[in-house]
Image (cartoon, grey):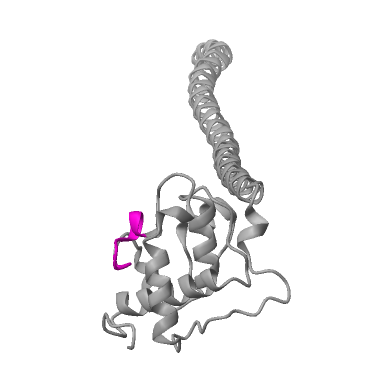
Amino acid sequence: MRLDRDLRSQLLGRLHKQLCYSAPAIALVAGGVMFQTFTAQQTVLAEEVSSTSVMLASNHRSAEASPEAGSEAEAEGEAEAEGEAEAEAEAEAEGEAEAASHPKAALVRRPDGYKPQYDERGNNPASLIERGEALFNDASLSTNGLSCASCHGAKGDAGFQTSFQQPFPHPVAMGTNMFGMETVHADEMVQLCMVAPMAAEPLPWDSEELAALAAYVVHAQQRFAGEVDGHCNR
């Protein structure tokens, strides 16, 4: 019996020693597997975080670049628009300066205190209109052999723009382009033709010739607009 107890004690002692050596090894092995697993998970997580950070940084740079690109495009558009506006303003100013610089620009405008000797509404005597028609075809008024009829026909019914349908005063291209006048009266139109196409001096403002020509031009305008027939007595 005692021998059996001693043998059992020896066997238990050996088994205890084996367990003491085996348990740490098992723990180390298990711990290594867990550490490797944890390390792999941390690596994957770090890679995901790094990729996300790169993507966010790229988006942030794009977001910052887009307003800058938009601002640059907007600035270029504004600069281009300003340049065009300045060019138009300069061209307009040059045109006005050129018109104002015409040597006889002041002579074709009605002077202060001037009183027309004709009725711009068309209530003119037939004799005055007939006198104007004769002068309208008189080339001796010019220095280059032209008469009013050279451009506008013997009956004063040609070579007019659509604005001629409007009663005087109305816009006349030659007055605007060469003399800076927005609108002209009938007598001013006569003076424009005297100075520019006919290369002559303007008629005296108190002369019968100017009154007659202006009366005829008013009559021609009313005929052009269909307000009167071709007779001087309306």
Residue 189 at x, y percent in the picture: 50, 65
Residue 115 at x, y percent in the picture: 65, 80
Which image quadrant: the C terminus? bottom left
Q: Taking 156 as reference, is 66 above or below it?
A: above
Residue 47 at x, y percent in the picture: 51, 24
Q: Foreground: 182 or 103? A: 103
Q: Foreground: 18 or 101? A: 101
- Image point 73% across, 72% down: which residue? 112
Span colored in magenta: 149-157
Q: Foreground: 51 or 156? A: 156
Residue 88 at x, y percent in the picture: 56, 46
Residue 231 on the magenta span? no
Q: Taking 87 as reference, is 171 above or below it?
A: below
- Image point 33% across, 83% down: which residue? 232
**Residue 13 picture quarter:** top right
Residue 156 on the magenta span? yes
- Image point 46% across, 70% down: which residue? 213
Position of residue 113 in the picture relative to residue 214 (left or right): right
**Residue 50 picture quarter:** top right
Q: How many labels does the image show?
A: 0
Position of residue 234 in the picture relative to residue 77 (left or right): left
Position of residue 85 in the picture relative to residue 224 (left or right): right
Q: Residue furthest right?
A: 112
Q: Foreground: 46 or 120? A: 120
Q: Taking 132 as reference, is 106 above or below it?
A: above
